[in-house]
Amino acid sequence: MTYATVMVSLALDQPNNARLEVAGELAERFEADIVGIAAARFAPPLYFADGIAAQRLIDQEEGSVKRRLADLEAQFRAATRTRSARAEWRSAMDFPARYVLAQARCADIIVSGGQSPVFSDAFSLVSPRDLVMQTGRPLLVVPDRINWLDSRSVLVAWKDTPEARRAVADALPLLRKARDVVIAEIPEKDDDRSAVMTHVSDVAAWLARHGVTATARVPEAGNETAAVQLERVADDVGAGLIVAGAYGHSRFRELVLGGVTEYLVTQTARCVLLSH
């Protein structure tokens, strides 16, 4: 398995430099094609005049959206000029989530920015929460302050769920190129620690059969949230990339109560590869 096509999702009114840099690195590293994608629609005001005045406003705003999408294309082409033998641009006057989700069929991995608001503007921005839940592709979330993909040390945030198993399989191309891979599961207070260690040891053995040397780690159960404990482990091992399954329980609970996935999408300073 490799990444033959890298897709990078760009957005209006957001910093795109970090995700473009990381997507370009991925394309270079795996000799992959790269596809830039963006979409937006004019968001009509709640109240405006009828007739000629209304149509003039619509025409002006739609023209503005088209110019801004053209600017994103220029930024994409400038950033990827030397990164890939084949760079392709796709854009549309459409809802961003709908358009990106449809076009994701052509990609092996999707690169997106993180730290978007919980309730974002559906006319101009596709949230990484929606992408990871619906694309059927691994999503690499890149914080805005990242300027390169440091995958020398990778932390696999394990939980014995289908999402975590899928994430590890999706991350294999990157794990094979990493220098250090650590698999960690954050135990809950009532967990049998020896049973948890069996989980991560099984994953390490599975990775070894796929050419990846990994070490298993289970910290002592603590009073802090799993997200805080996971971040501490990432600091300890110097991880530049975290691999995790996304949304092991209901999306509603994740949004209302927070959780590891929400933390990884919105707050961590590291790149995160997520699969659902």
Image (tube, grey):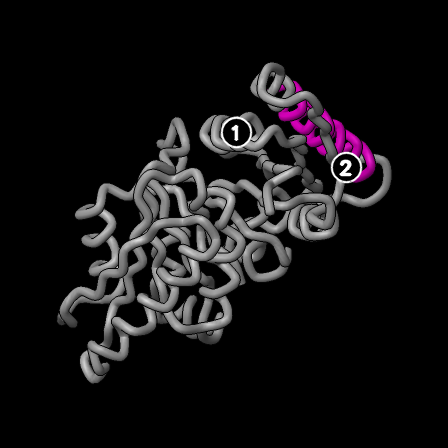
Residue 40 place in picture, x, y as percent: 68, 40
Q: Is residue 58 magenta?
A: yes
The nearer-to-camera label among 1 and 2 is 1
Residue drawn where x is 86% and y is 41% of the image: 51
Q: Quadrant of residue 253?
A: bottom left
Front-most of residues 43 and 212: 212
Front-most of residues 198 and 248: 198
User: Where does label 2 land, which residue?
Assistant: 58
Decide: is 195 above or below 225. Answer: below
Name the kind of residue labelled 1 in the image.
Answer: Arg
Taking the image as shown, residue 62 lies to the left or right of residue 127, namely right
Residue 33 place in picture, x, y as percent: 67, 31
Front-most of residues 146 and 153: 153
Judging from the image, what secondary structure is the residue with disc 1 in? helix
Question: What secondary structure prevails in the magenta region?
Answer: helix
- Residue 29: assigned label: 1
Residue drawn where x is 35% and y is 71% of the image: 257
Taking the image as shown, residue 104 lies to the left or right of residue 188, namely right
Name the kind of residue labelled 2 in the image.
Answer: Ile
Q: Is residue 237 magenta?
A: no
Dot 1 or dot 2: first in sequence order is 1
Q: Give yes or no for contact between labels 1 and 2 (Cβ–Cβ under 8 Å).
A: no
Residue 139 place in picture, x, y as percent: 53, 49
Q: Which residues are magenta?
A: 54-75
The 10 Å Cα crowd at callout 2, few under 14, some 14 to 19, many 20 or more, is some
User: Can residue 105 be spotted in the picture?
Assistant: yes
Residue drawn where x is 39% and y is 70% of the image: 256
